[in-house]
Amino acid sequence: MNGIFELLLWPSLACLAITGIHAYLGLHVVERGVIFVDLSLAQMAALGTAIAFLAGYDIHGLGAYFFSLGFTLLGATVFSLTRTQKSKIPQEAIIGIVYAVSAAAAILIMDRLPEGAEHIKHIMVGNLLAVNAVDVAKLTAFYSVIGLAHWLWRKPFILISVNPEQAAREGYAIWLWDFLFYATFGFMVTLSVSIAGVLLVFSYLIVPSVAAILFSQKIGARLAIGWAMGTTVSLVGMFASYRFDTPTGATIICTFGAALVLLAVLRNFLSFSRRG
């Protein structure tokens, strides 16, 4: 038992820290209708990491982080400038194109490097079991700063996510607040991807928010549901990974999928019972 505790303690705490900020930002993403923005920015971060590795930087070092952050902020700039009500091109199309090109470019770069396949796997699903106390402390401090920024700017962020037309009527510079939103989002994603990988970061952002929407329309209730689901799935997935000796990131992602299906069935059952 002590062996399990020592092995899973810091990875579990890292997952809880990721849950805290991702469940909140996921509400914004779903309300904005830009579901794949996280996946796209995460892939931009991964591309920056791949280029840093090609340039000779340690993939886990500070240099690789700044490469990754730079590409993520570039994506944030593109997304903030392409959101317009008059455009004939949906923003989701731009997001999808950025993701596809970034993913292809990262594969091309990794294909030229030794052990490229292993690095691609790390980028996609991370390596949670390698997380230590320093990583958890860094995550907690970093996410706390981002959370504070979103608390201070909560009015424009929430208003633009829920009702951008009203925000424009009230005089908010939509492109500027969008850039600030995507920039803080990008800072969060850059750090998250280096630990959890692209697919797991996407799951933490979207699945708890989608599950919460099934049961409530209130932001406070959605946050509570999202945090509860993310925490439960993290712990169950982590233990299942240890019990069945499976990759941790992929196991948690599959656990998220199974939990969402169960919650959807429960939601339909409750609706049926009320009608009955």
Image (tube, grey):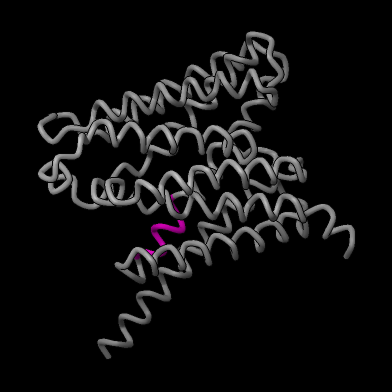
Residue at 31% in and 83% down: 272
Question: Residue 8 falls in which quadrant of the image?
Answer: bottom right
Q: Could you tell me residue 187's position as x and y percent?
A: 50, 33
Is the stretch drawn in magenta largely helix, strand or loop? helix
Q: Is residue 47 above or below residue 91?
A: above
Q: Residue furthest bottom?
A: 276
Residue 221 appears at what percent x and percent y?
39, 69
How far across and how far down the image is residue 268, in percent? 35, 75
Q: Quadrant of the N terminus?
A: bottom right
Q: State the residue lying farthest toward the front.
A: 152
Residue 105 part of the magenta-drawn span: no
What's drawn in magenta, residue-wise? 206-213
- Image quarter of residue 178: top left
Q: Does residue 209 show up magenta in the picture?
A: yes
Q: Residue at x 49, y 43 (%)?
A: 146
Residue 105 higher or lower than 97, as above or below? above
> Which residue: 19% across, 39% down?
172
- The one nearer the camera, 215 or 67, is 67
Q: In the orientation shown, which residue stands out farthest toward the right?
A: 2
Q: Residue 217: name its quadrant.
A: bottom left
Q: Quadrant of the C terminus?
A: bottom left
- In front of the other: 152 or 183: 152
Look at 47% across and 21% down and name the residue there.
71
Point out residue 138 in the picture as x, y percentages from the top left corner.
66, 40
Count of labels in the image: 0
